[in-house]
Structure formats: structure tokens, C-alpha cells
Image (spheres, grey):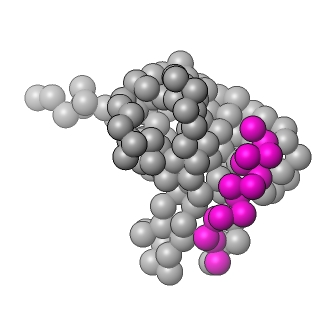
Amino acid sequence: MIEKLKKLNENSYSPYSKFRVSAIAVMKDGQEFGGVNVENASYGATICAERSAIVSAISNGYKKGDFEKIYVYVNEPKASTPCFMCRQVLCELFEQDKEVICVNNKGEETIYTIKDLCPFPFDESDLKK
């Protein structure tokens, strides 16, 4: 998986931060969807690699609960966890026990569950009166 993540990372469009991120969402049926961060001069319009991969899976017909795990790679010596916007999307579409595998440029992995990263999720129960 590390070689796939490194190759995909080359597609990152990160001219402002120079912080290249790639992600691969793995579905329960084994299908994989890749994504990279795509920056914009208006930082708020930037899309993260995690959401890019997840949206690709949804665009290809997958649904909430179809996700097995996601890998997040940064071309840096220290692995990074998903930002809070990505964590919200992960909480929405992944089961709480699914893994988020954060990988650095040496191939070292740190593994979290969705519950680890989002112990107090905002979800549909928060929208009910």
C-alpha cells in the first residue's frame, strides 16, 4: 500500500502549503479509491485527500457503511491525522471501529479507529428535536 500512496501523492496539488497528502479508501469488497489534497488560493475551497478519496467512492455507488478503512499518507517524517472536517465525514460514513491508518514517508504506520479520532461525534442524533 505504501507504494500506491507514494505514487498517488505525486498528484497532490499543493502549491501554497507544499504539504502533499494522499489517501486511499478501502471498501469492504476490496475496491480502492484514491484521493489527494487539491489546494486553492482561497484556502477554504481546498479539498483534503481523505474527503477526495471518500467522495470518489460515493460517486462510484458506494454507501455509508461500505468503507473498511482508509490510509492517509504525508510525504513528511511525521504522520498526520485527518483534519476535523475530514473527521466529520469519516464519522458520517465509516463505522466507529474502522481503521484510519496514518503513514509517514518512511512507511511507518500509526493506526487509529474512527472512535479514537472522534470520541464525541456530531451525527444525526444531534439533529433530532
Q: Could you tell whether 34 is left or right of 119 in the image? A: right
- Count the numbered circles shown: 0
Residue 119 appears in the picture as rendered: no
Q: Is residue 114 magenta?
A: no
Q: Could you tell whether 26 is left or right of 45 in the image? A: right
- Residue at the image point whose x is 57% and y is 27% from the top: 30
- Residue at the image point whose x is 75% and y is 38% from the top: 1
Q: Is residue 8 magenta?
A: yes
The foreground one among 35 and 50 is 35
The foreground one among 91 and 61 is 61
- Residue at the image point whose x is 24% and y is 26% from the top: 125
Q: Position of residue 35 (x, y in %)?
A: 56, 52
Looking at the rendering, the stretch of residues picked out in magenta corresponds to 1-15
Residue 46 appears in the picture as rendered: yes
Q: Position of residue 25 (x, y in %)?
A: 56, 38
Q: Position of residue 55 (x, y in %)?
A: 42, 48
**Residue projecting furthest to the left:** 129
Q: Position of residue 113 (x, y in %)?
A: 59, 25
- Residue at the image point whose x is 42% and y is 69% from the top: 45
Among the 4 quarters of the image, the one containing residue 81: top right
| Quarter of the figure that contains the C terminus | top left
The foreground one among 104 and 81 is 104
